[in-house]
Structure formats: C-alpha cells, structure tokens
Amino acid sequence: METLAPMPMEKRLALPSLQPQRADIVVHGIAILLACMQELDLPAITVSEYGNLEGYLKVKYLYGGQA
C-alpha cells in the first residue's frame, strides 16, 4: 500500500506483476483488505498465485475440511 498508493498510474501500468486492468483499482482493494484484516484481527494472510481453488483444495484435503 505504501508503495502503490503514491505511485503514478503510468508506473503502476508498467509493473509486470500487476494486470493493467487492475492498476486503477488495486489501491482501493488493498485498503478494503487491510480494513477487513484489522477488523478481524488478522496479522497476516496467504496470497496464492493460483486463486481461490488452491485455497479450497488445501482446506479440503490438507486440513480435512476444517479451516
């Protein structure tokens, strides 16, 4: 957040790890995520390169369906 929020749009668009169609909304999404984490008292989250399906499979098969 500290890096992306002040970054000009042109620089965000040039980031290889950020999809161009998300460059204008990523800061707002991070702000929402941080607010949720604070409200739920979550010190950290795990972000997957593969999406929600990977998280579902981990919960289902590695943790026996219990998260």
Image: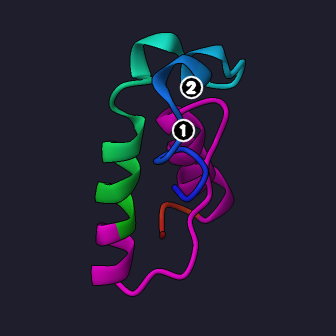
Q: Position of residue 64 (x, y in %)?
A: 57, 63
Please rate how many residues cluster around mark 1, counting C-alpha atoms within 10 Å: few if below 14, some from 14 to 19, many from 20.
Answer: few
Q: Residue at x 64, y 42 (%)?
A: 48
Pointer 2 and pointer 1: residues touching (CB < 8 Å)?
yes
- Residue closest to the far bottom: 41
Using the image, determine if residue 36 lies above or below residue 24: below
The stretch of residues the image draws in magenta is 35-63
**Can you identify the residue that label 1 sits on?**
7
Q: Residue at x 54, y 38 (%)?
A: 7
Q: Position of residue 35 (x, y in %)?
A: 30, 70
Question: Seen in the image, is 9 located left or right of residue 55?
Answer: left
* Amino acid found under the numbered disc labelled 1: Met
Up the image or down, 20 lies above or below 56; here it is above
The residue tagged 2 is 12
Q: Which mark is residue 32?
A: none
Circle 2 sits in a helix, a strand or a loop, which is it?
A: helix
**Is 53 in the magenta?**
yes
Identify the amino acid type marked 2: Arg
Q: Nearer the viewer, residue 37 or 6?
A: 6
Q: How many numbered marks appear?
A: 2
Rendered view: 34 above or below 25: below
N-terminal label among 2 and 1: 1
